[in-house]
Image (cartoon, helix red, strand yellow):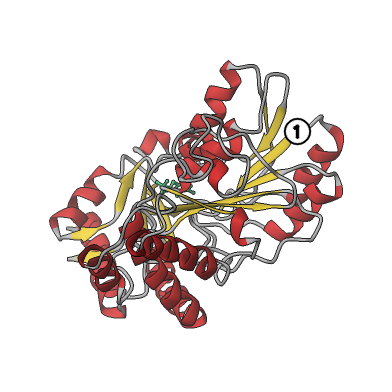
Amino acid sequence: MIYLDNAATSWPKAPLVADAIRQSIEQPVGNVGRSAHRPAMAAARILYDCRQALQRIMPPTDLEKTIVTHNATEALNIALFGSLDTGDTVLTTPMEHNAVARVLHQLVQRGVQVESCACDAFGRVDVDDFSRKLATLPISLAVFTAAGNVTGAINDVTTMVAACTRRKIPFVIDGAQAIGECGLPPMPDDAHGALCFSVHKGLLGPAGVGVMALYGSFAPRPLMFGGTGSRSDSELQPETLPDRYESGTPAIHAIAGSVAAIGVVAEHDEHLQAHRKRMGDILYSGLQTMEQLRLLSPQEGRVGLVSVTVREGTISTLTQHLYAKDIAVRGGYHCAPWAHRFLETTSHGGAVRFSVGPSTTEEEIEITLHAVKEAFDG
Ligand SMILES: Cc1ncc(COP(=O)(O)O)c(C=O)c1O
């Protein structure tokens, strides 16, 4: 099997992840904050270690503002539902994943207005248009992906955050495809917003852990209410961070695995990025030579994925051929209906996304390119 679906979730996971999960199950690990006995303290330690490790791979923030969720989707739901109200206008991009698009669709039913900024052919945000819209429209919040999950194009997050900060407009960054794949700059001191992502993609961690990192005074309302282990004598949700947002039992075993994964990625960040870029470039060059394909990803400035669609017909012959060869790619619509409309892939059945990981080899890329050719030439 050749696994080229790392943008959906990474495989294999980082070394030591399975060991860390097993250890957290085999050793006495209790429930965070629920008691002061040793197993409960061990759980609290794992969560603390996770918040601390995260500072190494994202724009750092205070540990208590590093909210651990169950995935990027939950983090984005809190950040958006918790801060947008009837009458607000949100600025976004045509390349958003459904973790943003479906939330905004819900918010539109509640009287929120959505404005979209211009992009280039690869879905990369036109930062001049973005800044102009912030300046001329009554924008309450901007939400944008740091790297698109269909084309992999990396946005100029520094300029976009600076534009929001200049206008004192909060931002929500969807970092699901960017974190662990391309560095994000530190946040300006006066920035207000959130960065949301999962640990199971570029960070090579297990499923079940996400992050909403808060910057400045951005403080959305919580989405879930319940037990936090703190202020347990009261039915009022605590206002203190991170408890305000972390109701219910955390996925502590996956969090233990995440600490191991983040450690590995932080340690080998440059090497991992260089490897992904090299594999992605080989893939890109090979796919570029096939006249039946239209490349949706930019040649430069993308994370470790290359997406294509077909010039004629639908992608299904290609995806079926790749699956038959046991090559795992993402075919069809990638939970990003706006992006597929923008890229005009809808009439072709969507796109085929090849996403590499740290374990992808040159030989696997060659076999894949050969299989793609075969799908057309027989
Ligand atoms: C850009 C983007 N945002 C959000 C998500 C949602 O991530 P999760 O399913 O881990 O919540 C994904 C997942 O594919 C994604 O690619």
Of helix, strand and loop, which one carries label 1? loop
Which quarter of the figure has residue 24? bottom left
- Does residue 288 appear in the picture of this structure? no
Q: Is residue 102 left or right of residue 350?
A: right
Location of residue 240 in the rendering, given as x and y in whole percent from the top left corner = 62, 45
Viewer-closest of 295 and 101: 101
Q: Residue at 56%, 72% (x, y): give it.
A: 56
- Does residue 356 appear in the picture of this structure? yes
- Few, some or many residues within 10 Å of mark 1 (<14, 14–19, 20+): many
Q: Is residue 300 left or right of residue 202?
A: right
Viewer-closest of 233 and 249: 233
User: In the rendered view, would you say 82 is above or below 87?
Assistant: below
Location of residue 171 in the rendering, given as x and y in whole percent from the top left corner = 69, 45
Q: Is residue 253 left or right of residue 190?
A: left
Q: Residue at 60%, 21% (x, y): give it.
A: 108
Q: Which residue is mark 1?
A: 140
Q: At label 1, which amino acid type do we have?
A: Ser
